[in-house]
Image: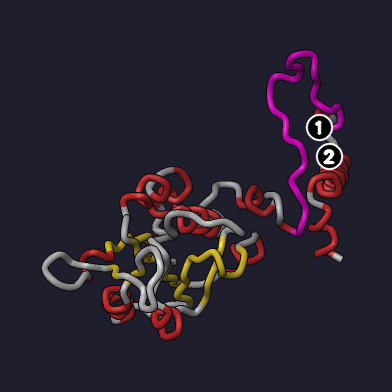
């Protein structure tokens, strides 16, 4: 998979996406992640990328020309399955979407900044708009990091034990069951005996029951979606 991220502040992307699981994916040759500084496509002597909105109002808007030039330069060499704009008014990201996006070959992410991007870029280039939730961030970089991480870890071969990703919370609309490791007793609390039994059928049944119980308690809305 090839992932290209367009940002006005690419330094915000580097640490989260060049360490841990994303780094492992890149080192294994399973994913290519590229950061593109929008200022390199800016206009004029000062490489301007933003301007005040027509009609007045507070804040600045990312201009269409730099974004269009950057996108067009990327499209010369690659066919993209989706060109994604990260915006609070997009479709809310979830595990189902992560699963779907992990199956494609190439993605562009556009990180908004200031008040957002010129609508014409959304009309001409953007094929999908995604939000992390009903709140506003200073830019799309944090959202890009979260979404790319969620996608990359699902690609076969990235995580050593692929079953680990498939048993995460929100797969099959259930929260993950409680997890325990050594020592068996910690501050007078002991590990449930079933996990020490060696009976994998009973362990699987216990984990499934715990997942349902936790989901009913913490996220009953997920069970409604499951019906």
Residue 112 in view in this figure: no
Task: Give the residues drawn in magenta, as a range.
Answer: 172-194
* Residue 201 painted magenta: no
Tell me if residue 72 comes above or below residue 90 in the rendering: below
Mark 2, residue position: 203
Label 1 SS: helix
Inter-mark Cα distance, 1 to 2: 6 Å
Tell me if residue 197 comes above or below residue 5 in the rendering: above
Q: State the scheme by which the image is colored.
A: secondary structure
Q: Nearer the viewer, residue 214 or 130?
A: 130
Assign the magenta stretch its main secondary structure.
loop
Q: Residues at badges 1 and 2 in contact (C-beta under 8 Å)?
A: yes
Q: Residues within 10 Å of mark 2 (few under 14, many from 20)?
A: some
- Horizontally, is 94 left or right of 53 in the view? right
Give coordinates of residue 100: x percent, y percent. 60, 69
Pick out the residue farthest to the left: 45
Give coordinates of residue 133: x percent, y percent. 60, 58
In percent of the image, x 45 and y 75: which residue is there?
83
Quadrant in which residue 201 is drawn: top right
Disc ID at residue 195? 1
In percent of the image, x 85 and y 45: which residue is there?
217
Query: Which callout, 1 or 2, points at the residue further toward the start of the chain?
Result: 1
Q: Residues within 10 Å of mark 1 (few under 14, many from 20)?
A: some
């Amino acid at each position: 998979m090839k992932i290209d991220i367009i940002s006005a502040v690419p330094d915000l992307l580097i640490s989260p996406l060049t360490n841990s699981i994303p780094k492992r994916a890149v080192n294994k040759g399973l994913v290519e992640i590229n950061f593109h500084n929008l200022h390199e496509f800016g206009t004029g002597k000062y490489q301007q990328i933003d301007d005040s909105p027509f009609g007045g109002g507070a804040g600045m808007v990312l201009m269409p020309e730099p974004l269009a030039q950057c996108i067009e330069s990327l499209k010369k060499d690659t066919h993209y399955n989706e060109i994604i704009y990260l915006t609070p008014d997009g479709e809310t990201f979830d595990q189902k979407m992560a699963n779907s996006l992990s199956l494609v070959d190439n993605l562009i992410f556009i990180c908004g900044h200031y008040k957002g991007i010129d609508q014409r870029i959304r009309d001409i280039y953007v094929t999908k708009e995604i939000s992390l939730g009903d709140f506003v961030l200073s830019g799309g970089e944090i959202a890009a990091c979260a979404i790319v991480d969620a996608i990359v870890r699902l690609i076969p071969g990235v995580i050593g034990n692929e079953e680990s990703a498939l048993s995460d919370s929100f797969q099959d609309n259930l929260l993950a069951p409680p997890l325990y490791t050594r020592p068996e007793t910690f501050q007078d609390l002991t590990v449930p005996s079933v996990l020490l039994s060696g009976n994998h059928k009973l362990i699987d049944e216990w984990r499934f029951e715990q997942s349902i119980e936790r989901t009913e308690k913490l996220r009953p809305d997920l069970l409604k979606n499951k019906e």
